[in-house]
């Protein structure tokens, strides 16, 4: 049986739309099946500066720039008791090539990317829920339920899973693996009247470090701020409290947050996500490749989600295009994609798993000017995952000092309250 499509993409978020645009611009017949009706609410609202080259290659940069999003030029990290903070200005990093990006409402941002995919030639069908998938011979296939409840089937030379945290194919194939000791839950919403930095620091994201948890505060506009709490799921379960109680108590006991939310007003109900940090044991198999959050997701503390999603979507789409041209069901390039994606994620995972450890915070909140190590950290926070040797060895030196801080004080020991 022939195929009506070259590629079927499950999911129309940043990874799926990036893949769809890349393939459509290459002349491929692309079908995107998205279960929601866009625009729709989504978490992950702070972009990294290295998204810009991808926007340019997709041809969507002008649309993003003209959408009126809050400009982001840096990030601030605060101790929960407001005793210390450190700020990073992307333009000050000697290893950082792109110096500004955006804080985005994902409903609007994702809609821009998906509509751009349609304009480039991809066929997008919203409110279509994929229920089954498989690979047989020379085709991958899916069965899906439409908005009217009818069941349909589609076949293609390749399938790309961009289904997000639901991880549709990985879950069905038993590939999901959770990071040991890193089961988190997050409670978040949008608020008005939050006192955020102004002047030259307008647009900065704030990350507030508590003892075993942290807050994000992302300015989406002068009137709207995204505020979220991330904590251990086991701690939440043991408390026996409802998410709102946990959130309100954490705000009240965290001076750096409480002082900014004295006049805050919720603009919508709280949202809750749990068990979101995981990886898949395999990203590419014959006629199937997983991208974006469906390839794995880590703690959102360094805002890497959208950049990693779009990077994986673009990389995998290019390899799928090559595989189709060669008439191959799997290629070395697709296997290489899996390795590279895990390597990109590992760059942030090293920061994330250390961020929760006291020695890391003691160095991070007391930055030293020596050897431009701060510039190397700045480049990672901006989104540079493929870094020159000059930045790489400085990162290795920084983490060597983190290790040493456990045994011999490199900087003054400070309490994490």
Image (cartoon, rainbow, N blue to C red):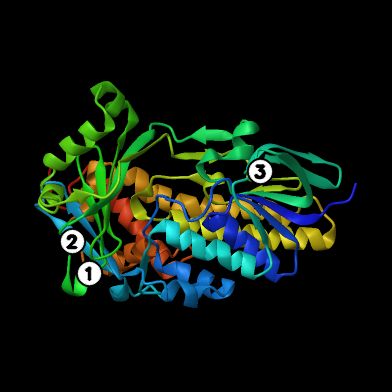
Q: Is residue 375 above or below residue 193?
A: below
Q: Secondary structure at mark 2?
A: loop
Residues tagged 2 and 3 counted as in contact (Cβ below 8 A): no
Q: Residue at x 25, y 47 (%)?
A: 215
Which residue lies under the disc numbered 2? Answer: 196
Quick one: label 2 or label 1, which is nearer the N terminus? 2
Label placed on residue 362 = none
Residue 295 visible: no
Residues tagged 2 and 1 counted as in contact (Cβ below 8 A): yes
Q: Secondary structure at mark 3?
A: loop
Rendered location of residue 61, percent (x, y): 49, 75
Q: CA distance from mark 2 to mark 1?
A: 8 Å
Which residue lies under the disc numbered 3? Answer: 146
Q: Is residue 12 above or below residue 28?
A: above
Q: Residues within 10 Å of mark 3 (few under 14, many from 20)?
A: some
| Direction from residue 249 to residue 37 in the image, left or right | right
| Direction from residue 412 to residue 393 in the image, left or right | right
Between 87 and 307, the one lying in front of the other is 307
Residue 359 visible: yes
Task: Count up the numbered dots.
Answer: 3
Label placed on residue 202 = 1
Q: Residue at x 40, y 62 (%)?
A: 47
Q: Residue at x 78, y 56 (%)?
A: 5
Quick one: label 3 or label 1, which is nearer the N terminus? 3
Q: Is residue 250 above or below residue 300?
A: above
| Direction from residue 136 to residue 18 in the image, left or right | left
Rendered location of residue 128, percent (x, y): 63, 45
Rendered location of residue 149, percent (x, y): 66, 38
């Amino acid at each position: 049986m022939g195929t009506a499509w070259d590629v079927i993409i499950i999911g129309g978020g940043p990874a799926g739309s990036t893949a769809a645009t890349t393939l459509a611009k290459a002349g491929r017949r692309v079908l995107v099946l998205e279960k929601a009706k866009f625009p729709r609410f989504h978490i992950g609202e702070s972009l990294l500066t290295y998204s810009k080259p991808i926007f340019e290659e997709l041809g969507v940069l002008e649309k993003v720039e003209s959408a009126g999003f809050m400009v982001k030029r840096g990030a601030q990290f605060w101790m929960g008791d407001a005793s210390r903070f450190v700020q990073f200005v992307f333009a000050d990093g000697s290893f950082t090539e792109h110096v500004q990006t955006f804080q985005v409402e994902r409903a609007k941002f994702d809609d821009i990317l998906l509509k751009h995919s349609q304009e480039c030639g991809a066929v997008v069908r919203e409110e279509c829920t994929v229920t089954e998938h498989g690979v047989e011979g020379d085709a991958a296939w899916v069965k899906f339920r439409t908005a009217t409840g009818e069941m349909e089937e589609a076949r293609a030379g390749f399938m790309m899973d961009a289904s997000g945290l639901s991880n549709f194919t990985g879950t069905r194939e038993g590939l999901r693996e959770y990071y040991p000791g890193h089961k988190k839950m997050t409670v978040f919403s949008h608020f008005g009247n939050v006192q955020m930095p102004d002047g030259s620091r307008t647009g900065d994201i704030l990350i507030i470090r508590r003892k075993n948890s942290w807050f994000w505060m992302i300015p989406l506009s002068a009137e709207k701020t995204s505020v979220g709490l991330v904590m251990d799921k086991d701690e939440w379960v043991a408390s026996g409290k409802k998410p709102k109680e946990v959130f309100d108590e954490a705000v009240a006991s965290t001076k750096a947050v409480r002082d900014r939310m004295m006049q805050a007003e919720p603009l919508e109900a709280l949202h809750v996500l749990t068990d979101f940090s995981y990886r898949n044991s395999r990203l590419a198999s014959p006629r199937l490749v997983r991208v974006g959050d469906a390839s794995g997701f880590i703690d959102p503390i360094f805002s890497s989600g959208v950049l990693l999603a779009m990077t994986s979507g673009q990389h995998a789409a290019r390899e799928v295009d090559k595989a189709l041209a060669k008439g191959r069901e799997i290629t070395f390039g697709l296997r290489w994609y899996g390795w590279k994606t895990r390597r990109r994620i590992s760059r942030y995972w090293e920061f994330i798993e250390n961020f929760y450890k006291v020695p890391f915070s003691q160095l991070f909140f007391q930055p030293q000017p020596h050897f431009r190590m701060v510039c190397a950290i700045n480049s990672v926070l901006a989104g540079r995952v493929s870094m020159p040797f000059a930045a790489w060895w400085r990162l290795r030196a920084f983490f060597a000092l983190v290790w040493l801080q456990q045994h011999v004080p490199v900087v003054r020991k400070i309490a994490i309250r």
